Amino acid sequence: WSTVRQSARVAVRMKWRLVTLKYRLIALSIALLLLLLIIIVAGILDTLTGIENDQATETPIAYSDTSLQVSDDVLQYREAIARELKKQQLEGQTNVVLALMMQESGGRGNDPMQASESKCGRIGCITSPDESIRYGVKHFASVFRQAKQDVKLTLQSYNFGGGFIDYVQENGGRYTKQLAISFSQMMYQRVKKSGIYQCHRPSAIEHQACYGDIEYVDAVLRYLTPTVLAEGKTGPIKGKLHAPLDIPLQMTSGFGSRVVFGKTDVHTGIDFSCHDTDTVHAVRSGTVIYSGLRGPYGQLIQIKQGEWITAYAHLSARQVKTGQKIEAGQAIGMCGSTGRSTGNHLHIEFKTSDWSGHIDPAPLFSL
């Protein structure tokens, strides 16, 4: 009888184990299905977000209302450039082309748009400003359309040639400074034996990117960057401020208390929306007192101007070093999302010392 009872207990235990295993398998299957569902939903949301971002980058940046800072030699060609752009239905790009001309020639010479090489493959085949503008604008319009109205890609392609557009399309579809560098490096390796191409900029020497000008986009856009006035009525800083971004300033987070990652935090500056392809500019002339990684700030640059310090945080790249003298409007880095950040943006501060004495920058930007 004891043997029977023991066998019965063993049978019960085996049955219970089978039942337990069954429910465990069911629970595991449900968990896997839920995980798969989450992955699918996340993928759909990511795709939708990516489509939205792609569409946003195709929208042309309007530079018609920017503060154009070019010479009188260039301004004399405004009407001629506007007339040629009107034929291409691109009147809104007049300031861009004027800035391009400023970078190419300063408005001097018989070929102020430096269009000879694009037209005939050699320098000097264009012999009058009118011909230069006609062909230069036509070439600009062609590149602008191939670049899907991306101004930065258009400018760099005007300098590099149309092959850069194909290169960008094969590598993500959006202009970035890194793509400009890698394209220049690739092309330079192909042609450096000719001895025609030489490195002139320090950054080109550093990267051995001597084909064309890897700084061309920033060089042109510095003539277009809008200025915002900061008069004494709106704060303690007097005079003009150079806009920190090439795009219209859109504040996404203000100065003062806010909730970040579920905790109350004191925001010591303001945030501007930007993409990782946007260049960050110094708002005033001064000296770099900090350029490096700094905890929640991520990639940080601090510039001292008299009694005041401006800080630029969460950058994806820094283009200046500690101790370097900086001019207002100079490119100092790229928009990013380093440090404690949930997405690409520029965090900017005005303060009286390295880590304290902050004021609200919004009134200085008329916000």
Image (cartoon, grey):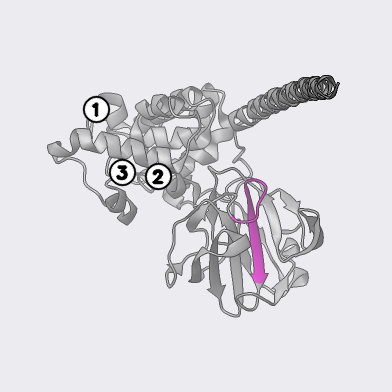
Which numbered disc flags the more N-terminal residue, 3 or 2? 3
Asked if marks 3 and 1 touch (Cβ < 8 Å), the reply is no
CA distance for labels 3 and 2: 20 Å
Q: Which residues are magenta?
A: 339-350
Asked if marks 3 and 2 touch (Cβ < 8 Å), the reply is no
Q: Which mark is residue 109?
A: 3
| Secondary structure beneath label 2 | helix
Which numbered disc flags the more N-terminal residue, 2 or 1? 1
Asked if marks 2 and 1 touch (Cβ < 8 Å), the reply is no
Identify which amino acid the numbered label 3 is placed on. Gly
Q: Quadrant of the C terminus?
A: bottom right
| Mark 1 lies on residue | 121
Camera-near label (3 vs 1) is 1
Residue at position x 39%, y 47% from top? 215
Residue at position x 58%, y 53% from top? 338
| Secondary structure beneath label 3 | loop
Indicate the quadrant where residue 302 lies: bottom right
On the image, the x and y values in percent for residue 216 come to: 40, 44
| Mark 2 lies on residue | 216
Identify which amino acid the numbered label 2 is placed on. Tyr
Identify which amino acid the numbered label 1 is placed on. Gly
